[in-house]
Amino acid sequence: ETGVTQTPRHLVMGMTNKKSLKCEQHLGHNAMYWYKQSAKKPLELMFVYSLEERVENNSVPSRFSPECPNSSHLFLHLHTLQPEDSALYLCASSQGGASTDTQYFGPGTRLTVL
Amino acid sequence: AQKVTQAQTEISVVEKEDVTLDCVYETRDTTYYLFWYKQPPSGELVFLIRRNSFDEQNEISGRYSWNFQKSTSSFNFTITASQVVDSAVYFCALIGYGQNFVFGPGTRLSVLP
């Protein structure tokens, strides 16, 4: 595997389900990010982790819970989501924690909340 | 506040035509970086280019070229002799020190055979 991978690629869940999105980067980077891409809206930064510590939480509802067990893996735990949470969730990584580093993105998880 | 505007929501061209995607940005930072990403139907954002605010030289990479003009706060992207595989959504993005990425709304490019 190379680059940034995300699983699953597609996920359909009910509002009472609990699920997790997984991101893995094979680039030796130290920072990882979660973004939300909704239809007809700009990409929204959700969380930033640098050296496994959360450095940014962009006013995201608590029904989204990130976890970064090491510099290569990032999870997004989902529970009691709303239909408006349906979106493409993109993971990215960058070399360092500096905000100006180029970010490399995974293919995303297409989430549908029923 | 930082802002990126991509005024063209959708563009359609016929294969082999040249096409320019516009990007206008706003920032109060003196040091910042500009990016272009391509998002094909598969969903992955593909990094195309990164430029810093002190380097206004235009750049060419194959059929791709970028025109950075600080005087007009623009960072336009031109594809020469477009191909069907260029069909995607293209995002311009801006970041300054201590800031987060700010993405434009994207321009959907359709290249017709």
Image (cartoon, grey):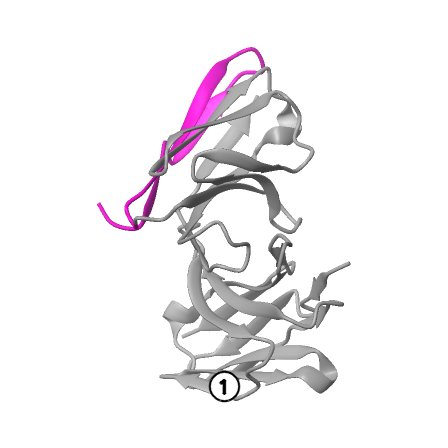
Can residue B16 be seen by looking at this rendering? no
Depth check, front residue: A29 or A64: A29
Quarter containing the C terminus of chain B:
bottom left
Spot occupied by residue B111 in the image (x, y as percentages of width and height)? 46, 72
Q: Residue at x 39, y 45 (%)?
A: A30
Q: Which residues are magenta?
A: A1-27
Depth check, front residue: A53 or A14: A53
Quarter containing the N terminus of chain B:
bottom right
The mark tally for this picture is: 1
Callout 1 secondary element: loop
Spot occupied by residue B2 in the image (x, y as percentages of width and height)? 73, 61
Q: Quadrant of residue B23?
A: bottom right
Check the residue under mark 1 and report the chain it is in.
B
Can residue A110 be seen by looking at this rendering? yes
Q: Amino acid at mark 1?
A: Asp
Relative vertical location of residue A20 with respect to residue A7 in this rendering, above or below: above
Left or right of B60 on screen, residue A45: right
Q: Quadrant of residue B76?
A: bottom right
Q: Which residue is mark 1?
A: B18
Q: Residue at x 50, y 68 (%)?
A: B110
Depth check, front residue: B64 or A25: A25
